[in-house]
Amino acid sequence: MLRLLKYEFRKRIATLSVVLAILLLTQGWALFCLCTKEHADQLVLPFTFLIIFGFLGTVFLFFDGVSTFSSEFSDKKGYMMFLTPNSPGAIVGAKFLYAVITVVGGYSLFHLFAYWDYSLFINKWENVKEGTKVLEQIARAMFGMSLGNVTLYGMVFGIIRMLTLIAFGYLAVTISTTVLANHKYKVFLTIAVFVGVLVLVGVLTSAATNFLMETLTDQIGLSQSLETGMTALPEESNFFDILKVIEKTKMAEAMHVGMVIDVGFSVLQWAAAYFLSVVLVKKKVSL
Amino acid sequence: MLKCESLTKKYGSKLAVHNLTLNIEKGKVYALLGSNGSGKTTLMKMIAGLTHPTSGTILYENQPIGIASKKEIAYMPTDSFFYKYMSIKDVGKYYKDFFQDFDEEKYKELLERMELSEKLKASSLSTGLGAKLKLCVTLARKAKLYMLDEPLNGIDIIAREQVMNTILEAMNEENSFIISSHLVDELETVIDEAIFIKNGVLELNRSAEELRAQYNNSISEIYKMIYLGKGEF
């Protein structure tokens, strides 16, 4: 599978280089402005571009991955993989792995740049640093961890959502190029299958997560302790007093369990999408 | 070596191959003959594992088509299929990475003989040069079964002899060849058996020598008789 993976990268090295070059150039511009400009508002443009390109770059990598996956399963380029003595599991696995590496890599790089710029930014403008203290307190109360760690968790969850999207995108393409290969409305049906599966899985996962979370919050008496704490607050209490009440409950514990449940369901979804894709390729591939 | 039993392939409502039963033996050269759309390519693609039969079975050395068969079957498709970025040298590297039986030295030797430079882009080659490249990379494998789909497609009359000689040199008692071609005359002297397919159905599968003796005609003429509906077979 590693050899197949090597060729996945080799095939798309030009595309990856362009995405990387754009991201690096935008970051260079942001850094230049951070070091040379005197006013914070002069950084709006480079930061906006960095966010837009970071987001668009990840979305582009998603579409590029899915479209390449689609073309190789439906046209002659697929011969390059399917003529070789590799199992469908290895072929599909290499493509999934490529998506994981590029999306995780791209997303992490973008966040690394954002964190770097943010650190420089708050060091240069002290008044901004003061503002982040409120965010820090919210993070401690709600999640029981620092703002930096909450940001890291946010990044990990962003990657998880992206990978789920890719896994179902690949599954939809596999269905389109196998079961629906000769169907007149295969493009329409593929989109319908993709959206349908995403909605169905989303509803089921959300229902299961809610059920588990409700059971948990009942067990730890979260609603009760929150209600008691809030009722006991004097009328003149401010936002920080509310945060202190939340901090005393087991809200952070519930949030952590919620995250674990979410990750667990996501892993199950990826595994299901991968195995179903492999079975379809094994039984139905038609090049 | 290879057994196809009641093989059928449908693309939607179109029947590409219908109830085809075939035996391929070791050490023989088979001509797979038929008009356009008769099902020759579909049959080869099923044997190569590129497409699955709708029904029926294919056994290579008594095992279903899969990783083991792909290690021993070298298929030369009629279409160009190399990745866009690939030079002729990259094509060789790719085959070396995936096929244990790929002989890099032989590949270089075949390229030289076909006057193909390793620096050329595979995707920008003309049909004829592309066919030569596909042939070089396929024959550089020490496979047990070679399947060549229209190996003479786009190759000019001068180079045809060179290509046929290259194919002939690769033949021995340990391997078998299935060659499809519209240019029946070119295959006339090299084949042991002729397989005629018409509209996805196996019309005839006999020894070339027997056919020539029985109909007192060349394979090329028998081909015309079958496809023009002249005579009983």
Image (cartoon, coloured by chain):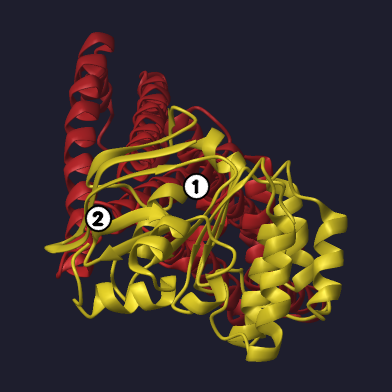
Chain colours: A red, B yellow
Q: In this view, does B165 lie to the left or right of A173?
A: right
Nearer-the-camera pick, B4 or B183: B183
Q: Which amino acid does label 2 sit on?
A: Phe
Residue B112: percent from left, percent from top:
86, 74
Q: Is residue B78 left or right of residue A177?
A: right
- Tag 2, which chain? A
Q: What residue type is labelled 1?
A: Ile
Whether residue B94 can be seen here: no
Nearer-the-camera pick, B28 or A189: B28
The residue indicated by pointer 1 is A159
Residue B57: percent from left, percent from top:
30, 37
Nearer-the-camera pick, A51 or A145: A51
Circle 1 or circle 2, nearest the eye: 2
Residue A65: percent from left, percent from top:
49, 61
Residue found farthest to the top: A219
Query: Which residue does the image show at 54% across and 70% down from the upper left?
Result: B187
Secondary structure of residue under mark 1: helix
Measured in 3D between alpha carbons, the distance from the residue under mark 1 to the one under mark 2, in whole angstroms, is: 19 Å
Is A147 located above or below residue B39 in the figure? above
Whether residue B147 can be seen here: yes
Is A190 located above or below residue B36 in the figure? above
Report crowding for label 1: few under 14, some 14 to 19, many 20 or more residues within 10 A (C-alpha): many
The residue indicated by pointer 2 is A194
Residue B222: percent from left, percent from top:
34, 72
Work out whether mark 1 precedes mark 2 in sequence or the reverse, and give the earlier one: 1
The quadrant of the image that shows the C terminus of chain B is bottom left
Query: Which residue does the image show at 21% across and 47% down from the upper left?
Result: A197
- Tag 1, which chain? A
Report crowding for label 2: few under 14, some 14 to 19, many 20 or more residues within 10 A (C-alpha): many
Nearer-the-camera pick, B204 or B133: B204
Q: In which quarter of the image is residue B100?
A: top right
